[in-house]
Image: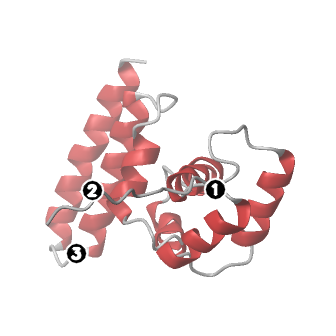
């Protein structure tokens, strides 16, 4: 038996509208002193600001995570990963690293630093760590030559 039921989607009042200073202030109040932000909390923010979940997600990525992210010190990024738990590490890294203002050179540096950190934290014998670090340094030198 088929019924002709209509599904009515309620669009938040501010969806599609330009963000106002008041919207940014509200978002800031929600985000500022919060230790962890999960999916439920993002839903709460979206209801409070009357915007869609994805709109809040994008603003958090662009206005907070993007500004806090550190290309040189990957340990600082652990703070971000632990705070914004509604996103996984890969989503955060992809968002920041795929921004057009980050050059290929900076992306290579970021990945080399990441490799170096992983190696230094691993159980590889020191002699091998030194050899790998030497190769990483050579790659850095090659990149610097091509400025």
Residue at the (27%, 66%) spot, across then down: 118
Q: Residue at x 26, y 53 (%)?
A: 133
Q: Disc 1 vs disc 2: Cβ atoms closer than 8 Å? A: no
| Label 1 vs 2, first from the N-terminus | 1
The quadrant the N terminus occupies is bottom left
Residue plotted at (41% across, 42% down): 97
Q: Residue at x 37, y 64 (%)?
A: 89
C-alpha distance separating marks 3 and 2:
11 Å
As drawn, 112 above or below 83: above
The alpha-carbon separation of the residues under discs 1 and 2 comes to: 26 Å
Residue 65 falls in which quadrant of the image?
Answer: bottom right
Single out the mark in the foreground, 1 or 2: 1
Q: Quadrant of residue 106?
A: top left
Seen from the viewer's position, the closer of residues 26 and 95 is 26
Marking on residue 64: 1
If the image is split into quadrants, where does the C terminus sit?
Answer: top left
- Residue 60 lies, in percent from the top left, at 60, 56
Name the side, left or right, on which 83 lies relative to 3: right
Mark 1 or 3, nearer chain start: 1
Q: Position of residue 88 (x, y in %)?
A: 37, 66
Tell me the mark number nearer the camera, choosing from 1 and 3. 1
Which class describes the residues within 10 Å of circle 2: few (<14), some (14-19), or many (20+)? some
Mark 3 lies on residue:
122
């Amino acid at each position: 038996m088929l019924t002709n039921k209509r599904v009515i989607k309620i669009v938040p009042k501010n969806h599609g509208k330009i963000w106002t200073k008041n919207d940014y202030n509200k978002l800031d109040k929600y985000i500022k002193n919060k230790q962890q932000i999960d999916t439920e909390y993002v839903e709460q923010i979206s209801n409070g600001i009357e915007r869609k979940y994805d709109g809040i997600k994008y603003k958090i990525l662009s206005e907070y995570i993007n500004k806090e992210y550190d290309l040189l010190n990957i340990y600082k990024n652990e703070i971000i990963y632990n705070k914004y738990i509604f996103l996984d590490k890969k989503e955060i890294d992809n968002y920041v690293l795929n921004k057009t203002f980050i050059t290929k050179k900076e992306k290579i540096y970021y990945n080399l630093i990441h490799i170096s950190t992983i190696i230094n934290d691993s159980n590889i014998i020191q002699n091998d760590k030194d050899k790998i670090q030497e190769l990483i340094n050579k790659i850095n030198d090659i990149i610097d030559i091509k400025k």
